[in-house]
Structures are given as structure tokens and as C-alpha cells.
Amino acid sequence: MQSVELILAGFGNVGKAFYELVRFRRMRILDRYGLDLFFRAVIRKKGWICSPDELGKGIQPSTRWDEMTGRECFFPPKKSGVWVECTPSDIHTGEPGRTNILRALDLGWHVVTAAKGPLVADPAALYKKAESRKRKIRISGATAAALPAIDTAIYALAGTEIQRIEGILNGTSNYILTRMHQGLIYEEALREARKKGIAEPDPSMDVDGWDTAVKLLLISNAALKQKLCLKDVFVEGIRGLSREELYRQSKKRKAVKLLGTYLAEKGRILLSVKPEALDGDHPLYGVVGAEKGITFHTDTMSRITVTGGKSDPGGAAAALLKDIINMYKHCIIT
Ligand SMILES: NC(=O)c1ccc[n+]([C@@H]2O[C@H](COP(=O)([O-])OP(=O)(O)OC[C@H]3O[C@@H](n4cnc5c(N)ncnc54)[C@H](OP(=O)(O)O)[C@@H]3O)[C@@H](O)[C@H]2O)c1
């Protein structure tokens, strides 16, 4: 049995889902994997840290924060475990996750993150620090959550050349496009997605293609050991599409999807996110509603597609947990 301490930064939708999942699954994980997951602290913006017992008792923000001298106090001396980053994603500054993750790595903690910001804004600093401290960073929670995109690329496709990646990586835009194919105009489909809790109040990151671009970038960099940046991605969203255009494509037995594409061609790498009309025999044609999917085109394993994977807080929490378990049980990815 191995005891694994967790520090959870961010206790919003994903953080809470992760906390509940670990509590619910704790005995099963111990039984099946020999890992005893234990929360050392939970951190929110308003600044409280506490043990799970205190959480249950509803300890209020800041009651203990003021007594603390700084972030160091989260880290027990001579112990390490996993820092779980679930704070908001700022893709320009990477904060607050960037500072949190660097500090955690510095003190010898592994990191799993649902926050994309730090991975896009300053990946070099994070991975350099991780390497120098011999710690791991796992990012499934930030890359299409429950869809096992990175695992598939790294484990299942080991030894092949990935020549092209195509992904429907954003559930909100896929839901809107599916409903537009069924006859709704863009505004109606968006309103419906909001009502169902699929679209956020401000859906710009999703419908303008940036969420897909970030995920495509992170998956491509992880799968192909690249150091591409967001500015390398051509990005076009779905706002300009009309119901009539989608109807025309439906008549031709095509489905319009917001597709993220990585393509290595003639020594050049092309990354793009844009609406594309897929033929009926394309493996991602049937990915509808808030579902996602990814296809890897390889030289020796042909075309491999994975679809599904919830992109909600529960799916993100499950991806974080998966990364922690695999980090301790299969230490082959460094
Ligand atoms: N929601 C999803 O379905 C989903 C799926 C995959 C990935 N993600 C990513 O997961 C992350 C969390 O998403 P969410 O939906 O859980 O967000 P959220 O509900 O807004 O929660 C954010 C949490 O972070 C805390 N926080 C903010 N600034 C902080 C700081 N400086 N230090 C410590 N804690 C801080 C907030 O504290 P307070 O509680 O005190 O305000 C809150 O608890 C985001 O990066 C998001 O992109 C989300």
C-alpha cells in the first residue's frame, strides 16, 4: 500500500467533483491499485486550507488563512504527493495555475491539472522545472477530459508515426452544430445549449474555436513531442455558419464539424481549427451532440479513432484521477 497525499487547488465545479470522486472511490482505489489517496489541503481563491474533516464541518474561508505565513505552509515538510490544479484557465498569463504548479514542482510534488492556462502560457518553464525535480505533470484533465486522447497517442500508438490528427474536441460547438443540422438557427441552438448547462454564460472560447485550439495544441505537443504555440494554430469558429449552409451539406450527406487538425506534410506542420464538412464515411461523422472524438492517422496502425468522453466537471475529475493512478502504477511516461 502506498499513501498518496493530495493538495487540491480550486474548489469550484471540477475541484468539488474531484474531491467527491476520490472520497467515493477511496476504498476501491486502495483495494485495486494499492494507493491510499488522502487530501492534505484544499485551497480556494478566498484563501482557506483545511483537511477533509474540516471541509465536512463547513469550515469557513479565511478562518485559518490569516494564521498562515504563505503558500509554503500547504506543503508538509519532507512529504510529497500530487498537486491537483483546478483553478480557472487564463491562457494569456497562465495564472494562478502557473505559480502554483511551479511551486509544487519545486517542492517535489507531482502535478495533475485541469487548468489549461499554465500549459499554454508557459509550458517550457513548467516542463523544465518538472525535469529538474524529476517530477511528472499529467494533463488529461485539460485535454478533452474523459476522452482518452493523450493516453491513446502515447500508450496505444507507441512506435507508430502519427501523420495527422483530427479532433472534435469541444462539446459545446459540436452540440450547436448538431442542432443546426436538425433545423435550429445558431442563436436557438446556443440558447438551448446554455439551458442544458452545456454552454457557459460566455461561450466565446468554445464557439470561436479557442478551446479546441488549446486542446489540439496540448495533444499534439504531448503526442508528438513538439513545442508548438497557440500562435501556430489557424483558428476560425462557428459563429458565421448559417442553418442554410448546414442544410445544404446535409443534403450532400455531409456533416459540418468544428475540426481541429494537426498535419505533418513535406517537413511542415500545419495546425488548424475550422468548420469542415465531413463525408459520411469519415470516422468522426457520427460524433453528435456534446460528444467528442479524435482520429489519429498513423503509418503502421492505419486510422485509430476514439469517441465519447464526458467534458463536464465529472469527466474532468475522472481524468485527473486516472492520471494520478497511472502516474503511480505505470511510470513509463516521463
Ligand atoms: N467545468 C468543466 O467542465 C471543465 C472541464 C475540463 C477542464 N476545466 C478546467 O478546470 C478548471 C476549473 O474549472 P471550474 O469549472 O471548476 O471553475 P470554477 O467553478 O470557476 O472554480 C474555480 C475555483 O478556483 C478557485 N480559485 C480561483 N482563483 C484562485 C487562486 N488564485 N488560488 C486558488 N484558488 C483559486 C476558485 O475559488 P473560490 O471558490 O474561492 O472562488 C474556485 O474554487 C478551469 O481551468 C477549467 O478550464 C473545466
Image (tube, rainbow, N blue to C red):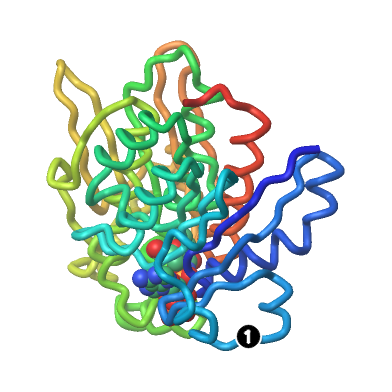
Q: Residues within 10 Å of mark 1 (few under 14, many from 20)?
A: some
Which of the 4 image quadrants contains residue 16? bottom right
Which residue occupies 44% across, 46% down?
A: 285
Residue 171 in sight from this viewpoint: no
Whether residue 275 is situated above or below residue 289 in the rendered picture? above
Which of the 4 image quadrants contains residue 24? bottom right
| Residue 315 image offset from top left, x and y in percent | 58, 58
Which residue occupies 36% across, 82% down?
A: 201
| Residue 75 image offset from top left, x and y in percent | 52, 55
Which residue occupies 67% across, 46% down?
A: 4
Residue 108 in sight from this viewpoint: yes
| Residue 73 image offset from top left, x and y in percent | 49, 62
Which residue occupies 23% across, 70% down?
A: 242
| Residue 147 image offset from top left, x and y in percent | 53, 47
Query: Where's the N terminus, which quadrant?
Result: top right
Asked which secondary structure carries label 1, the reply is: loop
Which of the 4 image quadrants contains residue 38? bottom right
Nearer the observer, 21 or 243: 21
Ligand 1 positioned in quadrant: bottom left
Query: Which residue type carries mark 1?
Result: Ile
Whether residue 31 is situated above or below residue 56 in the rendered picture? above
Query: Is residue 153 shown left or right of residue 165?
Result: right
Q: Is mark 1 within 8 Å of ligand 1?
A: no
Residue topped by disc 1: 59
Query: Is residue 144 shown left or right of residue 127?
Result: right
